Amino acid sequence: MLDAVVVGAGPNGLTAAVELARRGFSVALFEAKGTVGGGSRTEELTLPGFRHDPCAAAHPLAVNSPAFRALPLDRYGLEWLHPELPMAHPFPDGTAAVLSRSVGETAASFGPRDAGAYRRLVAPFLPKWDTLVRDFMSLPLTALPRDPVTLARFGLAGLPPSTWLTRRFRDERARTLFAGLVAHVMAPLGGFATGAVGLVFALAAHARGWPVARGGSQAVSDALAAYLEDLGGSIHTDYEVKRLDDLPPARAYVFDTSPTALARIAGFGDHYANYRYGPGVFKIDYALDGPVPWTAPQARTAGTVQIGADSGEIAAALRAASREGRAPDAPFLITVQPGVADPTRAPAGKHVFWAYGHVPNGWTGDLTDAIERQLERYAPGFRDRVLARATAGPPELAARNANYVGGDIASGAVSGLQLLLRPKLSPFPYGTPHPAVFICSSATPPGPGVHGMSGHNAAKAVWRRLRRT
């Protein structure tokens, strides 16, 4: 009998398997698709030689992850490549605010009236970032925090809505960039703890940047998989699990799946009936004949570029997708251009580029024209650079990855108490009604992103149970 079986080979499932194998437990991992990866894959979606990341592409959370930093993933081919700027947010007038590795450069891009306010915002946390991120991403706490004072101070700043936090800024440039940071998790700007979301992304950039993985995001998953196999774990792909009886006998079962799928497979009935899924996304992967012709110079050297004229336009786009049930007329866009740091992604002189906007969960329309109209506002002539495009709305995203229910790439609404307490209001979120069954997906704390911490935290709960029994 195996000690543990893991279902789902996304970053969290792979991390959970690795953590258990590192501690001497026998582990087998089962994945429905033909390769491992989940939301961290790389494929030729458009033309031969153009390597696209179907979901995650820039990795501020991965490079800062306490789980990943404790693993020898560099020995298995994972290399982080850093663009000159982690992120830029251009404006219609051709200027841009930036999120730089340098706090000073970032503050200066907001203008003199907000530079000091931004420095004061991040100053208490950046020197203690490594301890803070471990405490924050291990919530709910499985042990006492290492720096409870800094964690409490972070909570006081981050638990209120982001709109409260940005009141300290006097001009729109800082408010707009911060609103874009919050929108990465598709949360309404006025929601509970959204200030913490923006702060985490900003601090992550100052601490270690927003890099891309050399060769594509698949490198993250492949490194985890190779390490797991070296530890003696086995990986079985093309193996769809429809019920627990499909799996070999084990002392524990760990699911990197949506709560909906887990309830169906394990026979938990309506145990997760109150779990809410959030907005979907409409994503386009482009093969380009050259770099994106941004008007703002800063955007040309940034790995990630946020598109939204001001905080009001960003808030309206989020509101349309999450509350009004319609696609926004001017979608807020998150875009990534890996080629500014990794020229191996496309043939010489060519580029890959991706962009997505938020749409209602399960939306079946086509947002291509609205996305490209937004891009043309900040990069005139963009359409002339397009060699090929691959579009994916909520149905296509859900078909590629079953965890993206209705196209929700966060695997659950990141709003209200569900931002922190997911998938249920429970002090033991990785446990389920069955004592030998656990969940480790992005539907558990600390939530969405390629960081492996949900898998790490769940594995901790599993190995404690295995040692007790």
Image (cartoon, rainbow, N blue to C red):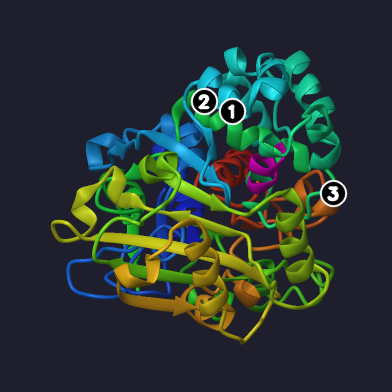
Nearest the viewer among 185 and 64 is 185
Could you tell me which residue is drawn at 56 percent across and 47 percent down? 93
Residue 345 image point, x, y percent: 23, 56
Q: Residue furthest bottom?
A: 364
Residue type for callout 3: Gly
Lower position in the chain sequence, tag 3 or tag 2: 3
Total label count?
Answer: 3
Residue type for callout 2: His
Which of the 4 image quadrants contains residue 135?
top right
Could you tell me which residue is drawn at 59 percent across and 57 percent down? 441
Magenta-drawn stretch, dominant element (helix, strand or loop): helix
Q: According to the image, label 1 marks what residue?
A: 203
Q: CA distance from mark 2 to mark 1?
A: 5 Å
Question: Is any atom of residue 419 visible in this view?
Answer: yes
**Callout 3 secondary element:** loop
- Contact, mark 1 vs mark 3 (Cβ under 8 Å): no
Which of the 4 image quadrants contains residue 263?
bottom right
Which quadrant: the C terminus?
top right
Residue type for callout 1: Leu
Q: Residue furthest left?
A: 348
Nearest the viewer among 463 and 255 is 255
Residue 246 image point, x, y percent: 49, 78
Which quadrant: the N terminus?
bottom left
**Magenta stretch bounds:** 175-180
Nearest the viewer among 313 and 453 is 313
Q: Is residue 176 magenta?
A: yes
Q: According to the image, label 3 marks what residue?
A: 190
**Callout 2 secondary element:** helix
Q: According to the image, label 2 marks what residue?
A: 206
Residue 373: numbered disc: none
Other-residue count near label 1 (Cα within 10 Å), few / some / many at <14 / 14–19 / ≥20: many
